[in-house]
Amino acid sequence: MYKFYFLIFLLISSSFSRPYQKMKKSHGYDDDICEYEYSSIYYVKPCEEGKFCKGYGDLSKCEELETPFQAKILGDSCSDDLECETNLICQNTCTLSCGNNNNLEAFKTHSGNYDCREKNDRYTLYKKDFTGIINHANLISYLNSYTAPSPLVQSPSFFQIPGEITFFSRKDETASNDGTLYRISKIESAYIGTLKDGTFVMNENACISGFALYFYPDGSDRVDPSRHSSERNYMYLRCVTLKDVNEDKLYVKYELEGKEYYYDYSASAPTQKLGGNLYDDSERIPIQSYPLIRNQLFSKYIGAFTKTKQEECENNKKYLEQYTCEDNEVRKWYYFYNHPEQYVLYYDEEEKDNDIMNFLLQKEYRIFISGNFLFMKFLLPIAMLLFL
């Protein structure tokens, strides 16, 4: 019943344009048709193993899988520069020169390009030296001497994202009582879903909870710990566990260190960014659609895409799918994490391998094989043996 009302809502919503139904056997089309539209409903079915659903205007048809092309990666043998990925050159193997500096190594960045990084400091993306700043006045003077901090000096690796933020601070010990001033001293990369609650981060997907809210570096969500007339503090994302959302009053309930708190997300947050538009006073609190459902799905996603799994994918250089590593279970939860409305409508815990779900996954990834076909693949040989 709830799914029926939710479907009606989606039909009138501009954010979701395709309601799906399982394709009927007597649809009147050839068996290789996998999607067609009738009365604003899209009837679908997954294709058999080795095929994917390809669109041809109003109809979609099962076609043979296309072998994905992948240029040769760093370290692969080659005979021509054209064989290698972008910005690699062929010197018997695909290579990126880092000069004569033995402390540097070539690596594939999160953006998909190649770059050089420090071998012994490969996870540090940004570092600021505050040596010699011993008091609040020194820090104020230092901040006034330059206009903006440098952008990230190093990109995270292909399977990592910008993660933990470390701060430098100085408290005002004079009679003026200008409070405490903080600035970023270090930013490190992290694997998805690996940083515990309470950690300040650049990207909320680095959190185990998959959720973060803006706080000042001292942990306050409302009062700036700096009371200086011109130098203020900025707010940064901090990992917390989402418990509930009240969309009418625009607040969330979250958990941190075993206690529950309320957070008003109606206001904007003064945030600091590295490079580009540095100071942004219009950053909204990051509450997306279906937040509680998305949190559940993120938990399922990182349950399949563990840190160990991500490390294995990086070590094995599986670069075709950055957020799934070509793993069907990871693909499923990553897809639904990004399409929570489809999860609500089409995922059934009692029928996990339904046709609509498999159609959506197969259309997204093309090489997805549904559990039904895997089951038949192993069942048929067993059945043949039984009848010998």
Image (cartoon, rainbow, N blue to C red):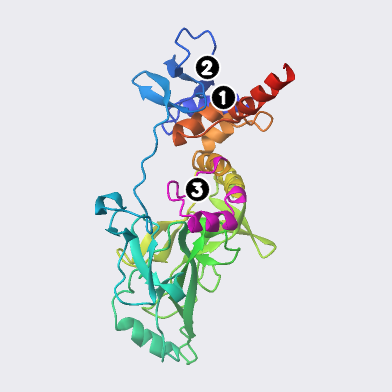
- Counting residues from the start of the chain, the first of labels 1 and 3 encountered is 3
Q: Amino acid under label 3?
A: Cys
Q: Are marks 1 and 3 in contact (CB under 8 Å)?
A: no
Q: Amino acid under label 1?
A: Asp
Assign the C terminus to one quadrant of the image. Answer: top right
**Alpha carbon of mark 3 to alpha carbon of mark 2: how far?**
30 Å
For mark 2, what is the residue? 23
Between 289 and 210, the one lying in front of the other is 210
Q: Which mark is residue 325?
A: 3
Q: Which residues are magenta?
A: 302-328
Between 50 and 158, the one lying in front of the other is 50
**Alpha carbon of mark 1 to alpha carbon of mark 2: how far?**
8 Å
Q: Which mark is residue 355?
A: 1
**Alpha carbon of mark 1 to alpha carbon of mark 3: how far?**
24 Å
Residue sitting farthest toward the right: 386
Q: Amino acid under label 2?
A: Met
